Image (cartoon, grey):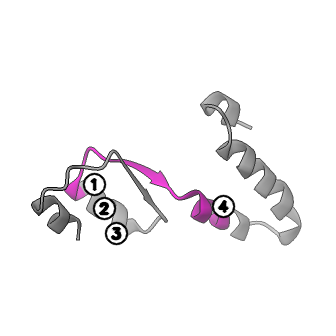
């Protein structure tokens, strides 16, 4: 799909957002090596919460939300 897009004139996206599927990231790096990568926040949060007991979910969700809404990296470091 990405090769076809490039062949048809698509320029490299500035940013690619994905769910962590390794094949997607490999394809992006191969076809559009200058494109920056970002993990989808929804999937990142789901992954973190799946590793925690349910009782820790509210606090972890609040911390993730605080990081997501941070003004910059300095404010995101909890």
In the picture provided, is 28 more to the left or to the right than 72? left
Does residue 3 belong to the magenta stretch?
A: no
Q: Residue at (61%, 62%) from the top-left corner?
A: 42
Q: Quadrant of residue 70?
A: top right
The image position of residue 59, as x and y in percent, is 85, 55
Which marked residue is nearer to the observer: mark 3 or mark 4? 4
17 to 4, vertically: above or below: above
In the picture provided, is 30 more to the left or to the right than 49? left
Q: Residues within 10 Å of mark 2 (few under 14, many from 20)?
A: few
Mark earlier in primary sequence (1, 3): 3
Q: What residue sits right under mark 4 in the picture?
A: 45
The label shown at residue 26 is 2
Query: Callout 3: helix, strand or loop?
Result: helix
Mark 1 vs mark 2, CA separation in Å: 5 Å
Q: Residue at (53%, 59%) from the top-left corner?
A: 40
In the picture provided, is 9 more to the left or to the right than 51? left
Q: Residue furthest front?
A: 9
Query: Callout 1: helix, strand or loop?
Result: helix
Does residue 36 belong to the magenta stretch?
A: yes
Q: What residue sits right under mark 1 in the picture?
A: 29
Q: What residue sits right under mark 3 in the picture?
A: 23
Q: Residue at (23%, 52%) from the top-left corner?
A: 32
Magenta residues span: 30-47
């Amino acid at each position: 799909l990405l090769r076809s897009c490039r062949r048809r004139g698509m320029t490299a996206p500035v940013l690619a957002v994905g769910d962590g599927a390794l094949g997607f990231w490999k394809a992006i790096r191969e076809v559009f090596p200058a494109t920056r990568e970002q993990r989808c926040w929804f999937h990142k949060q789901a992954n973190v919460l799946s590793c925690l007991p349910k009782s820790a979910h509210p606090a972890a969700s609040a911390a993730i939300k605080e990081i997501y809404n941070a003004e910059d990296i300095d404010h995101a470091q909890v």
